[in-house]
Amino acid sequence: MEESGFWVIQCEDAETASLALKARHPALLITDINLVGKMSGIELAQLARAADPALRVMVISGQPPTSPLPDGVTFFSKPVYPIELIREAAH
């Protein structure tokens, strides 16, 4: 993503990502479903969309989601190639 001109904030877990969302107000969130910590990527997506309904969110996983994704969230099944993310992010 960085090589394609995107400014990237990488976080270790959903809790750190939720703080970054509040502090930095990004235009796009990309998360895996399975994350380290107490919060899943789906929970992070729900929190992010509730805080900013205009935020674009992409969720990635090797398995189909076990619970519904929030409205407006795009799902990518692994393996995900960088060009797919870049193409979606550019919309």
Image (cartoon, grey):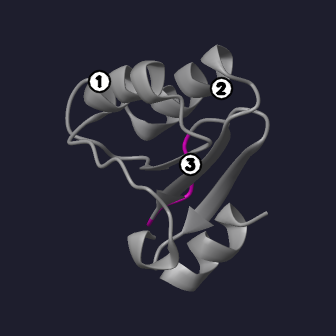
Residue at 20%, 39% in the rendered image: 36
Q: Is residue 28 magenta?
A: no
| Residue 80 visible somewhere in the drawing | no
51, 66: nearer the viewer? 51
The quadrant of the rendering that contains the C terminus is: bottom right
Callout 1 crowding tier (Cα within 10 Å): few <14, some 14–19, many ≥20: some
Q: Quadrant of residue 66?
A: top right
Q: Are marks 1 and 2 in contact (CB under 8 Å)?
A: no
Whether residue 5 sits left or right of residue 32 in the image: it is right
Q: CA distance from mark 1 to mark 3?
A: 20 Å
Q: Are marks 1 and 3 in contact (CB under 8 Å)?
A: no
| Disc 1 secondary structure class | helix
| Disc 3 secondary structure class | loop
| Residue 42 visible somewhere in the drawing | yes
Query: Residue 65's spot in the image, x, y percent?
Result: 56, 48
Is residue 27 placed above or below 1 in the rendered structure? above
Residue at 76%, 31% in the rendered image: 54
Give the residue at mark 3.
Answer: 65
Give the residue at mark 2.
Answer: 49
Give the residue at mark 1.
Answer: 15
Q: Which mark is residue 25?
A: none
Q: Amino acid at mark 1?
A: Glu
Q: CA distance from mark 2 to mark 3?
A: 17 Å
Residue at 45%, 27% in the rendered image: 21
Q: Amino acid at mark 3?
A: Pro
Callout 3 crowding tier (Cα within 10 Å): few <14, some 14–19, many ≥20: some
86, 62: nearer the viewer? 86
Whether residue 73 sits left or right of residue 2 in the image: it is right
